[in-house]
Image (spheres, helix red, strand yellow):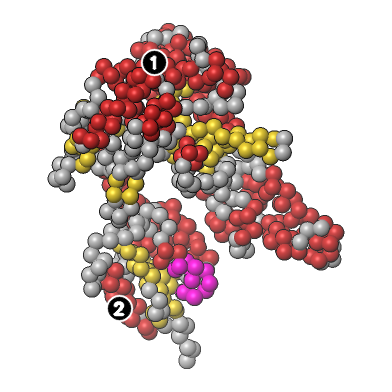
Amino acid sequence: MSKTRKIRCAIYTRKSSEEGLDQEFNSLDAQHEACAAYVASQKHEGWKLLPARYDDGGKSGGNLERPALQQLLADIEAGLIDMVVVYKIDRLTRSLADFAKLVEQLEEADCSFVSVTQAFNTSSSMGRLTLNVLLSFAQFEREVTAERIRDKIAASKKKGLWMGGVPPLGYDAHPDPNARELVMNDTEAATVRRVFDLYDELARLNAVMRQATSEGLISKRHVFSTGRVQGGNPFTRGQIYHILRNPTYLGRIRHKDTSFPGQHAAIIDQHQWDRVQDKLEAAAMRRRGGSGSDQATSSTPTAPLLGKLRDETGDILTPSHTQKGSQRHHYYVSNRLIYGKPDPSGWRLPAKALEDVVTQAIADHLRQAAKHHQVVSASDALTSATAVKATETLVAGIERNGLRVVVDILRSGSISDGRLHLDLCAKTLATRLNLSKTELNPRLCSVDVPFTIRRRGVEMKIIAGEMAPSPDATLIRALRNAHDWVVQMKAGSSVKQIASATSISESYITRIVPMAFLSPRIQQAILNGSQPTDLTLETIARSKIPMGWSAQECLFGIAQIA
Protein backbone atom coordinates (compact mmCIF):
# COMPACT_ATOMS: atom_id res chain seq x y z
CA MET A 1 0.00 0.00 0.00
CA SER A 2 1.40 3.41 -1.00
CA LYS A 3 1.97 5.93 1.75
CA THR A 4 -0.34 9.00 1.71
CA ARG A 5 1.50 12.22 0.76
CA LYS A 6 1.65 14.71 3.60
CA ILE A 7 0.07 18.07 2.77
CA ARG A 8 1.34 20.83 5.04
CA CYS A 9 -1.51 23.24 5.76
CA ALA A 10 -1.30 26.85 6.99
CA ILE A 11 -4.34 28.79 8.20
CA TYR A 12 -4.65 32.48 7.32
CA THR A 13 -7.14 34.72 9.16
CA ARG A 14 -7.98 38.41 8.80
CA LYS A 15 -10.32 40.99 10.32
CA SER A 16 -10.75 44.48 8.83
CA SER A 17 -11.26 46.38 12.10
CA GLU A 18 -9.55 46.12 15.48
CA GLU A 19 -12.86 46.04 17.31
CA GLY A 20 -13.12 43.02 19.61
CA LEU A 21 -9.56 41.82 19.06
CA ASP A 22 -8.80 42.33 22.75
CA GLN A 23 -11.39 39.71 23.70
CA GLU A 24 -10.23 36.32 24.97
CA PHE A 25 -11.88 34.56 22.00
CA ASN A 26 -12.13 36.91 19.03
CA SER A 27 -13.04 36.69 15.36
CA LEU A 28 -9.55 35.56 14.37
CA ASP A 29 -9.74 32.70 16.87
CA ALA A 30 -13.17 31.69 15.53
CA GLN A 31 -11.85 31.62 11.94
CA HIS A 32 -8.79 29.63 13.00
CA GLU A 33 -10.87 27.10 14.93
CA ALA A 34 -13.20 26.49 11.96
CA CYS A 35 -10.25 26.08 9.58
CA ALA A 36 -8.43 23.76 12.00
CA ALA A 37 -11.51 21.55 12.23
CA TYR A 38 -11.67 21.39 8.42
CA VAL A 39 -8.00 20.39 8.20
CA ALA A 40 -8.61 17.68 10.82
CA SER A 41 -11.48 16.33 8.72
CA GLN A 42 -9.06 15.85 5.81
CA LYS A 43 -6.55 13.87 7.82
CA HIS A 44 -7.22 10.80 5.68
CA GLU A 45 -6.00 12.82 2.67
CA GLY A 46 -2.70 13.47 4.40
CA TRP A 47 -3.48 17.03 5.56
CA LYS A 48 -1.37 18.21 8.49
CA LEU A 49 -1.81 21.55 10.27
CA LEU A 50 1.36 23.56 10.77
CA PRO A 51 1.79 25.16 14.22
CA ALA A 52 2.50 28.71 12.94
CA ARG A 53 -0.44 31.16 12.89
CA TYR A 54 -0.88 33.85 10.27
CA ASP A 55 -3.29 36.43 11.74
CA ASP A 56 -3.88 39.95 10.42
CA GLY A 57 -6.07 41.89 12.86
CA GLY A 58 -7.31 45.34 11.83
CA LYS A 59 -6.03 44.99 8.24
CA SER A 60 -8.00 45.78 5.10
CA GLY A 61 -8.42 43.18 2.38
CA GLY A 62 -8.10 45.88 -0.29
CA ASN A 63 -4.32 45.44 -0.60
CA LEU A 64 -1.59 42.91 0.10
CA GLU A 65 0.45 45.06 2.50
CA ARG A 66 -0.33 42.92 5.56
CA PRO A 67 2.45 41.56 7.84
CA ALA A 68 1.03 38.07 8.37
CA LEU A 69 0.14 37.68 4.67
CA GLN A 70 3.65 38.72 3.61
CA GLN A 71 5.13 36.19 6.05
CA LEU A 72 2.77 33.54 4.67
CA LEU A 73 3.88 34.28 1.10
CA ALA A 74 7.54 34.16 2.15
CA ASP A 75 7.05 30.73 3.74
CA ILE A 76 5.20 29.52 0.62
CA GLU A 77 8.07 30.67 -1.57
CA ALA A 78 10.48 28.87 0.75
CA GLY A 79 8.55 25.63 0.11
CA LEU A 80 7.26 25.24 3.68
CA ILE A 81 3.53 25.19 2.85
CA ASP A 82 1.47 23.05 0.47
CA MET A 83 -2.05 24.33 1.24
CA VAL A 84 -3.45 27.65 2.49
CA VAL A 85 -6.74 27.34 4.36
CA VAL A 86 -9.03 30.38 4.81
CA TYR A 87 -12.49 30.78 6.34
CA LYS A 88 -13.79 32.78 3.35
CA ILE A 89 -12.21 33.92 0.12
CA ASP A 90 -12.47 37.62 1.02
CA ARG A 91 -10.32 36.95 4.12
CA LEU A 92 -7.42 36.44 1.71
CA THR A 93 -8.18 39.45 -0.54
CA ARG A 94 -11.04 41.56 -1.82
CA SER A 95 -9.20 42.71 -4.95
CA LEU A 96 -9.54 40.75 -8.17
CA ALA A 97 -6.16 42.02 -9.40
CA ASP A 98 -4.46 40.98 -6.14
CA PHE A 99 -6.22 37.62 -6.29
CA ALA A 100 -4.77 36.96 -9.74
CA LYS A 101 -1.29 37.71 -8.40
CA LEU A 102 -1.77 35.43 -5.42
CA VAL A 103 -3.05 32.52 -7.51
CA GLU A 104 -0.11 32.83 -9.89
CA GLN A 105 2.33 33.02 -6.98
CA LEU A 106 0.75 29.97 -5.33
CA GLU A 107 0.84 27.99 -8.57
CA GLU A 108 4.49 28.90 -9.04
CA ALA A 109 5.24 27.39 -5.62
CA ASP A 110 2.97 24.36 -6.26
CA CYS A 111 0.66 25.49 -3.46
CA SER A 112 -3.17 25.58 -3.41
CA PHE A 113 -5.70 27.23 -1.16
CA VAL A 114 -9.09 26.19 0.17
CA SER A 115 -12.03 28.20 1.49
CA VAL A 116 -13.70 26.30 4.34
CA THR A 117 -17.20 27.82 4.10
CA GLN A 118 -17.28 27.94 0.31
CA ALA A 119 -15.56 24.62 -0.40
CA PHE A 120 -13.45 25.77 -3.35
CA ASN A 121 -10.04 24.50 -4.29
CA THR A 122 -7.67 26.30 -6.65
CA SER A 123 -6.16 23.03 -7.78
CA SER A 124 -8.94 22.72 -10.40
CA SER A 125 -9.77 25.07 -13.29
CA MET A 126 -13.47 25.10 -12.32
CA GLY A 127 -12.53 26.07 -8.78
CA ARG A 128 -10.43 28.99 -10.06
CA LEU A 129 -13.27 30.15 -12.33
CA THR A 130 -15.80 30.09 -9.52
CA LEU A 131 -13.40 31.88 -7.21
CA ASN A 132 -12.90 34.62 -9.79
CA VAL A 133 -16.66 35.11 -10.03
CA LEU A 134 -17.09 35.30 -6.25
CA LEU A 135 -14.14 37.63 -5.87
CA SER A 136 -15.55 39.91 -8.57
CA PHE A 137 -18.65 40.36 -6.43
CA ALA A 138 -16.50 41.00 -3.35
CA GLN A 139 -14.56 43.70 -5.18
CA PHE A 140 -17.80 45.18 -6.53
CA GLU A 141 -19.17 45.38 -3.00
CA ARG A 142 -16.03 47.13 -1.78
CA GLU A 143 -16.13 49.70 -4.61
CA VAL A 144 -19.85 50.36 -4.12
CA THR A 145 -19.23 50.87 -0.39
CA ALA A 146 -16.44 53.35 -1.14
CA GLU A 147 -18.67 55.25 -3.58
CA ARG A 148 -21.45 55.33 -1.01
CA ILE A 149 -19.09 56.80 1.60
CA ARG A 150 -17.80 59.44 -0.84
CA ASP A 151 -21.36 60.39 -1.80
CA LYS A 152 -22.34 60.65 1.86
CA ILE A 153 -19.39 62.94 2.60
CA ALA A 154 -20.23 65.15 -0.40
CA ALA A 155 -23.91 65.33 0.57
CA SER A 156 -23.04 66.15 4.19
CA LYS A 157 -20.66 68.94 3.16
CA LYS A 158 -23.34 70.44 0.92
CA LYS A 159 -25.45 70.74 4.09
CA GLY A 160 -22.58 72.58 5.77
CA LEU A 161 -21.54 69.74 8.07
CA TRP A 162 -17.95 69.31 9.27
CA MET A 163 -16.83 65.78 8.32
CA GLY A 164 -14.00 65.35 10.76
CA GLY A 165 -10.24 65.62 10.75
CA VAL A 166 -8.08 68.16 12.58
CA PRO A 167 -10.11 71.39 12.91
CA PRO A 168 -8.49 74.44 11.33
CA LEU A 169 -6.94 77.19 13.44
CA GLY A 170 -9.76 79.22 14.99
CA TYR A 171 -12.13 76.33 15.55
CA ASP A 172 -12.55 73.24 17.70
CA ALA A 173 -14.66 70.16 17.10
CA HIS A 174 -18.07 70.25 18.77
CA PRO A 175 -17.94 68.62 22.23
CA ASP A 176 -20.84 66.39 21.19
CA PRO A 177 -19.26 63.72 18.93
CA ASN A 178 -22.60 63.32 17.10
CA ALA A 179 -22.71 67.00 16.16
CA ARG A 180 -20.93 67.55 12.84
CA GLU A 181 -20.17 71.18 13.55
CA LEU A 182 -17.22 73.46 14.28
CA VAL A 183 -17.18 75.63 17.41
CA MET A 184 -15.23 78.90 17.38
CA ASN A 185 -12.13 79.05 19.56
CA ASP A 186 -11.98 82.74 20.55
CA THR A 187 -8.23 82.81 21.25
CA GLU A 188 -7.33 81.15 17.95
CA ALA A 189 -9.93 83.19 16.07
CA ALA A 190 -8.11 86.34 17.19
CA THR A 191 -4.91 84.90 15.66
CA VAL A 192 -6.70 84.23 12.37
CA ARG A 193 -8.09 87.78 12.26
CA ARG A 194 -4.63 89.16 12.97
CA VAL A 195 -3.12 87.13 10.09
CA PHE A 196 -5.76 88.49 7.70
CA ASP A 197 -5.24 92.04 9.00
CA LEU A 198 -1.48 91.75 8.52
CA TYR A 199 -1.80 90.56 4.94
CA ASP A 200 -4.46 93.20 4.25
CA GLU A 201 -1.89 95.76 5.40
CA LEU A 202 1.42 94.33 4.14
CA ALA A 203 0.31 92.26 1.08
CA ARG A 204 3.48 90.15 1.32
CA LEU A 205 3.54 86.61 2.72
CA ASN A 206 7.14 86.84 3.91
CA ALA A 207 6.46 90.14 5.65
CA VAL A 208 3.37 88.66 7.33
CA MET A 209 5.39 85.63 8.44
CA ARG A 210 8.10 87.80 10.02
CA GLN A 211 5.60 90.08 11.74
CA ALA A 212 3.51 87.13 13.00
CA THR A 213 6.67 85.56 14.46
CA SER A 214 7.66 88.79 16.18
CA GLU A 215 4.16 89.02 17.71
CA GLY A 216 4.35 85.47 18.98
CA LEU A 217 1.53 84.09 16.81
CA ILE A 218 1.64 80.31 16.52
CA SER A 219 -0.11 77.55 14.56
CA LYS A 220 -2.86 75.37 16.02
CA ARG A 221 -1.68 72.94 18.67
CA HIS A 222 -3.48 69.61 18.40
CA VAL A 223 -3.03 66.54 20.58
CA PHE A 224 -4.02 63.25 18.92
CA SER A 225 -5.57 60.33 20.76
CA THR A 226 -2.19 58.56 20.60
CA GLY A 227 -0.59 61.41 22.54
CA ARG A 228 1.27 62.81 19.53
CA VAL A 229 1.37 66.62 19.51
CA GLN A 230 1.18 68.63 16.30
CA GLY A 231 1.61 72.37 15.78
CA GLY A 232 2.08 75.14 18.33
CA ASN A 233 4.98 76.57 16.28
CA PRO A 234 5.60 79.91 14.52
CA PHE A 235 3.86 80.15 11.15
CA THR A 236 5.60 79.19 7.94
CA ARG A 237 4.92 81.00 4.69
CA GLY A 238 2.91 78.03 3.42
CA GLN A 239 0.74 77.89 6.52
CA ILE A 240 -0.09 81.58 6.22
CA TYR A 241 -1.05 81.15 2.58
CA HIS A 242 -3.25 78.17 3.51
CA ILE A 243 -5.05 80.25 6.16
CA LEU A 244 -5.65 83.13 3.74
CA ARG A 245 -7.11 80.75 1.14
CA ASN A 246 -9.28 78.70 3.51
CA PRO A 247 -13.00 79.46 2.96
CA THR A 248 -13.80 77.89 6.34
CA TYR A 249 -13.06 81.32 7.88
CA LEU A 250 -15.81 82.77 5.72
CA GLY A 251 -18.30 80.37 7.30
CA ARG A 252 -18.18 77.85 4.47
CA ILE A 253 -17.29 74.15 4.12
CA ARG A 254 -14.96 73.22 1.29
CA HIS A 255 -15.44 70.10 -0.84
CA LYS A 256 -12.79 69.66 -3.54
CA ASP A 257 -12.92 72.80 -5.73
CA THR A 258 -16.19 74.21 -4.39
CA SER A 259 -17.49 75.37 -1.02
CA PHE A 260 -20.92 75.45 0.62
CA PRO A 261 -22.47 77.52 3.45
CA GLY A 262 -21.47 75.92 6.73
CA GLN A 263 -23.23 75.64 10.04
CA HIS A 264 -20.37 77.32 11.92
CA ALA A 265 -19.81 81.02 12.56
CA ALA A 266 -17.54 83.01 10.24
CA ILE A 267 -14.33 84.60 11.55
CA ILE A 268 -13.69 86.87 8.54
CA ASP A 269 -16.30 89.05 6.84
CA GLN A 270 -16.90 88.95 3.09
CA HIS A 271 -15.36 92.37 2.35
CA GLN A 272 -12.03 91.56 4.00
CA TRP A 273 -12.01 88.11 2.39
CA ASP A 274 -12.47 89.64 -1.07
CA ARG A 275 -9.72 92.24 -0.48
CA VAL A 276 -7.26 89.57 0.64
CA GLN A 277 -8.07 87.26 -2.30
CA ASP A 278 -7.58 90.15 -4.76
CA LYS A 279 -4.18 90.93 -3.22
CA LEU A 280 -3.16 87.28 -3.36
CA GLU A 281 -4.10 87.20 -7.05
CA ALA A 282 -2.12 90.39 -7.66
CA ALA A 283 0.91 88.88 -5.90
CA ALA A 284 0.58 85.77 -8.04
CA MET A 285 0.56 87.94 -11.16
CA ARG A 286 3.77 89.64 -9.99
CA ARG A 287 5.43 86.26 -9.51
CA ARG A 288 4.35 85.32 -13.02
CA GLY A 289 6.32 88.27 -14.31
CA GLY A 290 3.42 90.67 -14.70
CA SER A 291 3.69 94.43 -14.85
CA GLY A 292 5.28 96.21 -11.94
CA SER A 293 7.43 93.32 -10.83
CA ASP A 294 11.01 93.61 -11.98
CA GLN A 295 12.12 91.37 -9.19
CA ALA A 296 9.66 88.65 -10.13
CA THR A 297 10.72 88.86 -13.74
CA SER A 298 14.35 88.47 -12.86
CA SER A 299 13.64 85.37 -10.80
CA THR A 300 11.44 83.69 -13.37
CA PRO A 301 14.26 81.94 -15.32
CA THR A 302 15.35 79.93 -12.25
CA ALA A 303 12.02 79.49 -10.44
CA PRO A 304 9.01 80.17 -12.69
CA LEU A 305 6.72 78.11 -10.44
CA LEU A 306 7.59 80.16 -7.34
CA GLY A 307 4.51 80.49 -5.14
CA LYS A 308 2.40 78.32 -7.43
CA LEU A 309 2.54 74.84 -5.93
CA ARG A 310 1.87 73.40 -2.48
CA ASP A 311 2.27 69.94 -1.04
CA GLU A 312 -0.50 67.95 0.67
CA THR A 313 0.10 69.80 3.97
CA GLY A 314 -0.42 73.20 2.33
CA ASP A 315 3.29 73.99 2.50
CA ILE A 316 4.62 76.09 -0.39
CA LEU A 317 7.21 74.44 -2.67
CA THR A 318 10.19 76.80 -2.42
CA PRO A 319 13.03 77.07 -4.97
CA SER A 320 16.36 75.64 -3.81
CA HIS A 321 19.60 74.51 -5.40
CA THR A 322 22.80 72.56 -4.85
CA GLN A 323 26.22 73.23 -6.32
CA LYS A 324 28.38 70.39 -7.66
CA GLY A 325 31.53 71.77 -9.17
CA SER A 326 30.51 74.25 -11.83
CA GLN A 327 27.00 72.82 -12.15
CA ARG A 328 24.02 74.17 -10.21
CA HIS A 329 21.05 71.82 -9.74
CA HIS A 330 17.68 73.44 -9.04
CA TYR A 331 14.83 71.95 -6.98
CA TYR A 332 11.41 72.77 -5.59
CA VAL A 333 11.40 71.90 -1.89
CA SER A 334 8.69 71.88 0.78
CA ASN A 335 9.25 75.12 2.67
CA ARG A 336 9.51 73.36 6.05
CA LEU A 337 12.62 71.50 4.86
CA ILE A 338 14.40 74.85 4.42
CA TYR A 339 13.27 76.70 7.53
CA GLY A 340 12.50 73.81 9.88
CA LYS A 341 13.75 70.43 11.02
CA PRO A 342 14.16 67.45 8.63
CA ASP A 343 10.78 66.00 7.68
CA PRO A 344 10.54 62.69 5.75
CA SER A 345 7.10 63.73 4.46
CA GLY A 346 8.56 66.76 2.67
CA TRP A 347 9.11 66.98 -1.07
CA ARG A 348 12.35 67.65 -2.92
CA LEU A 349 11.62 67.63 -6.65
CA PRO A 350 14.05 68.36 -9.49
CA ALA A 351 12.96 71.71 -10.93
CA LYS A 352 13.26 70.94 -14.64
CA ALA A 353 11.37 67.64 -14.34
CA LEU A 354 8.55 69.25 -12.32
CA GLU A 355 8.27 72.20 -14.72
CA ASP A 356 8.10 69.81 -17.69
CA VAL A 357 5.38 67.79 -15.95
CA VAL A 358 3.27 70.88 -15.24
CA THR A 359 3.71 72.17 -18.79
CA GLN A 360 2.81 68.85 -20.39
CA ALA A 361 -0.18 68.29 -18.07
CA ILE A 362 -1.71 71.66 -18.99
CA ALA A 363 -1.01 71.21 -22.70
CA ASP A 364 -2.59 67.73 -22.73
CA HIS A 365 -5.59 68.95 -20.73
CA LEU A 366 -6.30 71.82 -23.14
CA ARG A 367 -5.73 69.59 -26.17
CA GLN A 368 -8.25 67.05 -24.93
CA ALA A 369 -10.78 69.78 -24.14
CA ALA A 370 -10.44 71.12 -27.69
CA LYS A 371 -10.66 67.63 -29.18
CA HIS A 372 -13.96 66.94 -27.38
CA HIS A 373 -15.37 70.49 -27.83
CA GLN A 374 -15.39 71.16 -24.08
CA VAL A 375 -13.74 74.58 -24.09
CA VAL A 376 -16.93 76.62 -23.68
CA SER A 377 -20.21 75.90 -21.93
CA ALA A 378 -22.36 77.18 -24.77
CA SER A 379 -23.77 74.70 -27.25
CA ASP A 380 -23.50 77.17 -30.11
CA ALA A 381 -21.49 75.44 -32.85
CA LEU A 382 -19.81 78.61 -34.17
CA THR A 383 -18.70 79.76 -30.72
CA SER A 384 -17.39 76.29 -29.89
CA ALA A 385 -15.48 75.98 -33.17
CA THR A 386 -13.85 79.38 -32.67
CA ALA A 387 -12.88 78.49 -29.09
CA VAL A 388 -11.45 75.14 -30.20
CA LYS A 389 -9.26 76.81 -32.81
CA ALA A 390 -8.00 79.37 -30.27
CA THR A 391 -7.26 76.56 -27.80
CA GLU A 392 -5.30 74.60 -30.40
CA THR A 393 -3.27 77.74 -31.10
CA LEU A 394 -2.59 78.15 -27.38
CA VAL A 395 -1.50 74.52 -27.07
CA ALA A 396 0.87 74.99 -30.00
CA GLY A 397 2.32 78.01 -28.23
CA ILE A 398 2.81 76.00 -25.03
CA GLU A 399 4.61 73.22 -26.91
CA ARG A 400 6.76 75.78 -28.69
CA ASN A 401 7.61 78.12 -25.79
CA GLY A 402 7.04 75.80 -22.83
CA LEU A 403 6.71 77.11 -19.33
CA ARG A 404 6.78 80.77 -20.33
CA VAL A 405 3.23 80.41 -21.65
CA VAL A 406 2.02 78.12 -18.87
CA VAL A 407 3.13 80.47 -16.07
CA ASP A 408 0.69 83.10 -17.31
CA ILE A 409 -2.37 80.87 -16.98
CA LEU A 410 -1.44 78.73 -13.96
CA ARG A 411 -2.99 80.11 -10.77
CA SER A 412 -2.03 77.45 -8.22
CA GLY A 413 -1.56 73.74 -7.76
CA SER A 414 -1.09 70.99 -5.23
CA ILE A 415 0.95 67.80 -5.23
CA SER A 416 0.25 64.64 -3.29
CA ASP A 417 1.57 61.12 -3.55
CA GLY A 418 -0.42 59.91 -6.54
CA ARG A 419 -2.07 63.09 -7.91
CA LEU A 420 -1.12 66.46 -9.37
CA HIS A 421 -3.91 69.05 -9.29
CA LEU A 422 -3.60 72.39 -11.08
CA ASP A 423 -5.99 75.37 -11.04
CA LEU A 424 -5.84 77.64 -14.07
CA CYS A 425 -6.65 81.34 -13.85
CA ALA A 426 -10.04 81.66 -15.57
CA LYS A 427 -9.61 85.36 -16.34
CA THR A 428 -6.18 84.96 -17.95
CA LEU A 429 -7.17 81.82 -19.84
CA ALA A 430 -10.33 83.47 -21.18
CA THR A 431 -8.27 86.45 -22.37
CA ARG A 432 -5.82 84.15 -24.17
CA LEU A 433 -8.76 82.43 -25.91
CA ASN A 434 -10.57 85.69 -26.79
CA LEU A 435 -13.51 84.71 -24.61
CA SER A 436 -15.27 86.14 -21.60
CA LYS A 437 -14.75 84.47 -18.24
CA THR A 438 -18.41 83.39 -18.11
CA GLU A 439 -18.16 81.57 -21.45
CA LEU A 440 -15.47 79.15 -20.28
CA ASN A 441 -16.42 75.62 -19.37
CA PRO A 442 -15.74 75.52 -15.57
CA ARG A 443 -13.94 72.19 -15.94
CA LEU A 444 -11.40 73.77 -18.28
CA CYS A 445 -9.70 75.50 -15.33
CA SER A 446 -9.18 72.30 -13.33
CA VAL A 447 -6.38 69.88 -14.27
CA ASP A 448 -5.99 66.59 -12.42
CA VAL A 449 -3.49 63.94 -13.52
CA PRO A 450 -1.75 60.90 -11.98
CA PHE A 451 1.56 61.83 -10.38
CA THR A 452 4.10 59.09 -9.67
CA ILE A 453 7.38 59.47 -7.82
CA ARG A 454 10.03 57.01 -6.79
CA ARG A 455 10.68 58.14 -3.24
CA ARG A 456 10.45 61.13 -0.88
CA GLY A 457 13.01 63.08 1.13
CA VAL A 458 15.63 62.97 -1.64
CA GLU A 459 15.58 63.68 -5.36
CA MET A 460 12.85 61.76 -7.20
CA LYS A 461 11.98 60.70 -10.70
CA ILE A 462 8.61 62.10 -11.75
CA ILE A 463 6.00 60.64 -14.09
CA ALA A 464 2.63 62.33 -14.55
CA GLY A 465 -0.35 61.73 -16.81
CA GLU A 466 0.42 60.29 -20.21
CA MET A 467 4.05 61.35 -20.46
CA ALA A 468 6.20 59.73 -23.13
CA PRO A 469 8.25 56.68 -22.08
CA SER A 470 11.64 57.52 -20.56
CA PRO A 471 14.27 54.80 -21.12
CA ASP A 472 16.60 54.22 -18.19
CA ALA A 473 20.15 54.43 -19.56
CA THR A 474 21.57 52.58 -16.55
CA LEU A 475 19.17 49.67 -16.99
CA ILE A 476 19.81 49.47 -20.73
CA ARG A 477 23.59 49.49 -20.22
CA ALA A 478 23.33 46.71 -17.62
CA LEU A 479 21.11 44.65 -19.93
CA ARG A 480 23.61 45.03 -22.77
CA ASN A 481 26.49 44.01 -20.49
CA ALA A 482 24.55 40.98 -19.27
CA HIS A 483 24.11 39.69 -22.84
CA ASP A 484 27.78 40.38 -23.67
CA TRP A 485 28.96 38.50 -20.57
CA VAL A 486 26.71 35.53 -21.29
CA VAL A 487 28.20 35.29 -24.79
CA GLN A 488 31.71 35.33 -23.29
CA MET A 489 30.76 32.65 -20.77
CA LYS A 490 29.40 30.44 -23.53
CA ALA A 491 32.77 30.85 -25.27
CA GLY A 492 34.52 29.52 -22.16
CA SER A 493 35.38 32.65 -20.14
CA SER A 494 34.90 32.50 -16.39
CA VAL A 495 33.41 35.24 -14.23
CA LYS A 496 36.86 35.89 -12.81
CA GLN A 497 38.36 36.37 -16.30
CA ILE A 498 35.54 38.74 -17.33
CA ALA A 499 36.00 40.74 -14.11
CA SER A 500 39.71 41.03 -14.70
CA ALA A 501 39.22 42.17 -18.31
CA THR A 502 36.55 44.74 -17.52
CA SER A 503 37.78 45.95 -14.09
CA ILE A 504 34.31 45.14 -12.69
CA SER A 505 33.81 43.14 -9.51
CA GLU A 506 32.84 39.48 -9.77
CA SER A 507 29.88 40.01 -7.42
CA TYR A 508 28.46 42.74 -9.68
CA ILE A 509 28.78 40.54 -12.78
CA THR A 510 27.08 37.66 -10.93
CA ARG A 511 24.13 39.89 -9.99
CA ILE A 512 23.75 41.42 -13.47
CA VAL A 513 24.10 38.30 -15.68
CA PRO A 514 20.57 37.00 -14.84
CA MET A 515 19.17 40.04 -16.69
CA ALA A 516 20.02 38.28 -19.94
CA PHE A 517 17.43 35.64 -19.05
CA LEU A 518 14.57 38.03 -18.34
CA SER A 519 11.43 37.51 -20.38
CA PRO A 520 11.31 39.22 -23.80
CA ARG A 521 8.47 41.49 -22.60
CA ILE A 522 10.55 42.74 -19.67
CA GLN A 523 13.60 43.36 -21.86
CA GLN A 524 11.50 45.16 -24.47
CA ALA A 525 9.92 47.34 -21.76
CA ILE A 526 13.40 48.29 -20.50
CA LEU A 527 14.55 49.19 -24.01
CA ASN A 528 11.55 51.39 -24.85
CA GLY A 529 11.26 52.89 -21.36
CA SER A 530 7.77 51.57 -20.56
CA GLN A 531 8.88 49.62 -17.46
CA PRO A 532 7.29 50.52 -14.08
CA THR A 533 8.96 53.48 -12.35
CA ASP A 534 10.08 51.30 -9.45
CA LEU A 535 11.82 48.78 -11.74
CA THR A 536 15.41 49.93 -11.32
CA LEU A 537 18.75 48.20 -11.64
CA GLU A 538 18.93 47.99 -7.85
CA THR A 539 15.50 46.30 -7.74
CA ILE A 540 16.55 43.67 -10.26
CA ALA A 541 19.97 43.08 -8.67
CA ARG A 542 18.43 42.49 -5.23
CA SER A 543 15.53 40.33 -6.43
CA LYS A 544 15.43 36.57 -6.53
CA ILE A 545 14.46 36.21 -10.19
CA PRO A 546 12.24 33.16 -10.85
CA MET A 547 12.88 30.97 -13.89
CA GLY A 548 9.38 31.27 -15.38
CA TRP A 549 8.76 34.28 -17.61
CA SER A 550 5.21 34.82 -16.35
CA ALA A 551 6.46 34.79 -12.76
CA GLN A 552 9.15 37.33 -13.67
CA GLU A 553 6.60 39.64 -15.28
CA CYS A 554 4.35 39.37 -12.24
CA LEU A 555 7.28 40.08 -9.90
CA PHE A 556 8.36 43.22 -11.77
CA GLY A 557 4.88 44.50 -12.60
CA ILE A 558 5.17 44.08 -16.37
CA ALA A 559 2.01 41.98 -16.61
CA GLN A 560 -0.15 44.83 -15.31
CA ILE A 561 1.08 47.46 -17.76
CA ALA A 562 1.31 45.31 -20.87
Q: Residue at x 28, y 61 (%)?
A: 18
In the image shown, does 186 or 60 lie closer to the viewer?
Answer: 186
Residue ranking furthest to the front: 214
- Asked whether 489 falls inside the magenta stretch, the response is no
- Looking at the image, which residue is at 32% across and 28% down? 195
Relative side of 156 to 119, left or right: left
Query: Label 1, label 2: how many angstroms apart (C-alpha)?
Result: 66 Å
User: Residue 90: which disc?
Assistant: none
Q: Residue at x 47, y 36 (%)?
A: 335
Earlier along the polypeptide chain: callout 1 or callout 2?
Answer: 2
User: Which is more toward the observer, 457 or 383?
Assistant: 457
Specify the quadrant of the image occupied by residue 167. top left
Q: In the displayed structure, would residue 469 be above or below residue 547?
A: above
Total marks drawn?
2
Q: Evaluate if marks 1 and 2 touch, with contact meaning CB atoms under 8 Å apart.
A: no
Residue 37 — which label? 2
Question: Is 78 inside the magenta-drawn segment?
Answer: yes
Crowdedness of circle 1 by 10 Å Cα count: few (<14), some, many (20+)? many
The stretch in magenta equals 71-82
Is label 2 in a helix, a strand or a loop? Answer: helix
The residue pinned by badge 1 equals 440
Percent across and percent down for residue 94 are 36, 55
Q: Note whether residue 491 is visible.
A: yes
Residue 257 in view (yes/no): no
Horizontal and vertical percent position of residue 165: 28, 43
| Residue 297, placed above or below residue 548 | above
Callout 2, which amino acid?
Answer: Ala
Query: How far across and how far down the image is residue 406, in percent?
Result: 52, 21
